């Protein structure tokens, strides 16, 4: 741990500690090592209300396992027991990963395959869900890199920081700023060598989405879409409590550039259905 578990007594040292954490590769670390880092405790957060509107939808795209699209709603809804660590889940923590637009969900849904193979063509099952209840969410915003993506994220972040600055002592505000900056940088992380590199953001998600905290989800900039859109991480309980309603499912194809998969892909819809029977998707 090289002293990372020792308590930090000044913001200057805290800044150095976080600079180190942002540069570390965590592949050789265990989860217990990260939980012992004292400076990661009590990371502050600001909540935003996501209202129910006619245009408020969320999208999720899953790579088809065969030539046919998925036929089970539960299969495309979320992974209830992931056997891996990812950006917003620890091992075994069920998380529903969604996006604010269909193309973002398509790009995000292919990222692991694009990084780990030469495959550049996929067929996917894309689901469109209507938000039916007001949501209380944390927006992860305080990263310079993600604020330069062309969205209005910087406006929300600056407004939040001004509010905090009015109500906090300058020293306390500096601590708040440093902790939210580290968290946002971890959610915006691109240099991923192993699942363990997601430890900090995954542990944050596990803590914040604890049912006792009454927080419905986390919004963070899409790394796969170069920070020009947003992803959502929701706890599965929201689906059990009818926060979302499935409206449409599409079978789509997508093709990425062979030499640079970060370019915007070519994609289209093969077929679409809004016919469902219990858990069955009727194509």
Image (cartoon, rainbow, N blue to C red):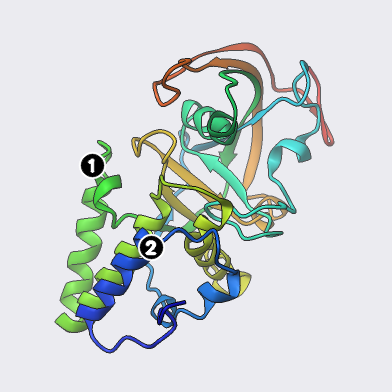
Q: Position of residue 45 (x, y in %)?
A: 38, 68
Q: Say which quarter of the image contains residue 262.
A: top left
Res 148 label: 1
Answer whether residue 45 is visible to the viewer in this image.
yes
Secondary structure of residue under mark 2: helix
41 left or right of 64 in image: left
Look at the picture and state if 178 lies above or below 150: below
Count of labels in the image? 2
Q: Say which quarter of the image contains residue 89.
A: bottom right
The answer to which of 203 and 234 lies nearer the viewer is: 203
Quadrant containing the C terminus in the rendered view:
top right
The answer to which of 100 and 190 lies nearer the viewer is: 190
Kindly identify which residue carries mark 2: 183
Identified at 69% across, 41% down, the residue is 77
For disc 2, the neighbor class at 10 Å (few under 14, some 14 to 19, many from 20) is many
The answer to which of 200 and 19 lies nearer the viewer is: 19
């Amino acid at each position: 741990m090289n002293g990372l578990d020792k308590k930090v007594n000044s913001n200057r040292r805290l800044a150095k500690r976080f600079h180190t954490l942002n540069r570390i590769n965590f592949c050789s670390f265990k989860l217990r090592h990260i939980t012992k880092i004292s400076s990661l405790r009590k990371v502050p957060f600001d909540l935003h209300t996501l209202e129910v509107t006619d245009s408020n939808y969320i999208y999720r795209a899953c790579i088809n396992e065969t030539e046919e699209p998925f036929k089970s709603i539960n299969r495309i809804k979320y992974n209830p027991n992931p056997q891996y660590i990812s950006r917003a889940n620890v091992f075994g923590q069920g998380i529903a990963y969604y996006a604010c637009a269909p193309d973002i969900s398509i790009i995000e849904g292919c990222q692991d395959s694009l990084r780990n193979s030469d495959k550049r063509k996929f067929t996917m099952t894309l689901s469109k869900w209507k938000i039916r209840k007001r949501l209380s969410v944390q927006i992860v915003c305080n990263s310079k890199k993600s604020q330069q993506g062309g969205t209005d994220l910087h406006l929300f972040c600056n407004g939040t920081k001004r509010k905090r600055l009015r109500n906090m002592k300058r020293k306390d505000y500096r601590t708040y700023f440093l902790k939210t900056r580290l968290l946002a940088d971890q959610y915006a992380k691109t240099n991923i060598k192993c699942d363990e590199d997601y430890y900090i953001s995954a542990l944050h998600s596990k803590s914040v989405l604890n049912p006792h905290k009454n927080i419905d989800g986390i919004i963070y900039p899409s790394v796969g879409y170069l920070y020009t859109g947003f992803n959502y991480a929701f706890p599965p309980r929201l689906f059990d409590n009818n926060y979302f309603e499935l409206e449409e499912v599409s079978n789509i194809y997508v093709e990425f550039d062979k030499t640079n998969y970060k370019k915007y892909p070519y994609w289209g819809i093969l077929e679409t259905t809004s016919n469902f029977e219990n858990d069955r998707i009727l194509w």
